[in-house]
Image (cartoon, grey):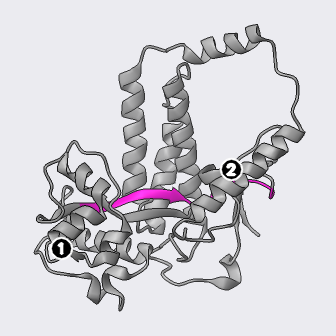
Amino acid sequence: MEFVQFHPTALYLKNAPRFLLSEALRGEGAYLRNIELKRFMPKYHELAELAPRDVVARAIAHELELVKRPDAAVYLDLTHLHADRVRKRFPTIYSTCMEYNIDIATELVPIRPAAHYAMGGVRTDLRGQTSLPGLYAAGEVACTGVHGANRLASNSLLEGLVYGARAAQNMREHLRPRRDHATVAGAENTAASTNGQPAQVEAFIKKVQSLMWQYVGVVRDGKGLRQVVSELSELQKQQPASGDRRSHEAANILQAGLLIARSALAREESRGAHYRLDFPLKNDVKFHKHSVVSGDKIRFE
């Protein structure tokens, strides 16, 4: 659960979605510039902008930390490339950014890293079966082992398509008669009910998200992880009463965040997408293993 990939270049504008700006932009020759408009990646890695995603994300995080402004950004620069080629080569990115008055061919694009993909998740066998009879998992929610500690581009296709098909086939082979329509309808009506506190639920979710970004983001350390585990555990006592769908989602977001934070605290090393300032090196002897959360314990096997 501690292995969460951060995409290094997501559009960072007020009131705009964190739209992911493809690595292909840097492959095409785009530069990354800091608040002083200086290229910074060459000092972090010999491949500069073409360094692995986790390296680029950490470099950007460090540049933002130097600025010490909560709204700071770095910039993706394609202005030195042929403008018509940029527009034709990346039509979706170009049109999306234009919706927010950014012409990627002629202007610097403000970006920050964004949480992107979970490499860990619900433990399954090779056919999508979990430890709970009748529950199957495939795709990003599952831990299949196809990624390792850092997702490679397009491995998600393998995870979703191959394991999704395997899980579906497994479910077909173990299909049980459906409940009658009245029972299903009753369940749907229950799920659609509301507890009438949408503002409280949204504030709760924003609090969890803020804590996760602050302490369990691109770069982590033991002190911050211990603090966030404590704060998230305290939040469990304050979570909105379950009633509507969003309330259930809030509880699930908190649970997932706590699992990620606890797993990150237990892994006292840096590997792939998990980077600890207090343990910057790999430790293959103790941690070249999967972390498995079971109840209050985390074991490595």
Q: Is residue 6 above or below residue 60?
A: above
| Residue 257, horizontal then vertical, whole percent | 52, 49
Which residue in the structure is indicated by mark 2?
138
In the picture, the quarter occupied by the C terminus is bottom right
Residue type of the residue flagged with mark 1: Asn
Which residue in the structure is indicated by mark 1?
34
Dot 1 lies on which element? loop
Residue type of the residue flagged with mark 2: Ala
Q: Is residue 146 left or right of residue 101?
A: right
Magenta region, residue range: 111-126
Q: Is residue 298 magenta?
A: no
| x 55%, y 29%: residue | 248
Q: Residue furthest bottom?
A: 46
- For label 2, the crowd category at 10 Å Cα-Cα, with few meaning under 14, some 14 to 19 and many 20 or more, is many
- For label 1, the crowd category at 10 Å Cα-Cα, with few meaning under 14, some 14 to 19 and many 20 or more, is some
Dot 2 lies on which element? loop
Which of the marked residues, 1 or 2, is nearer the chain's N terminus? Answer: 1
Q: Main secondary structure of the magenta part?
A: strand
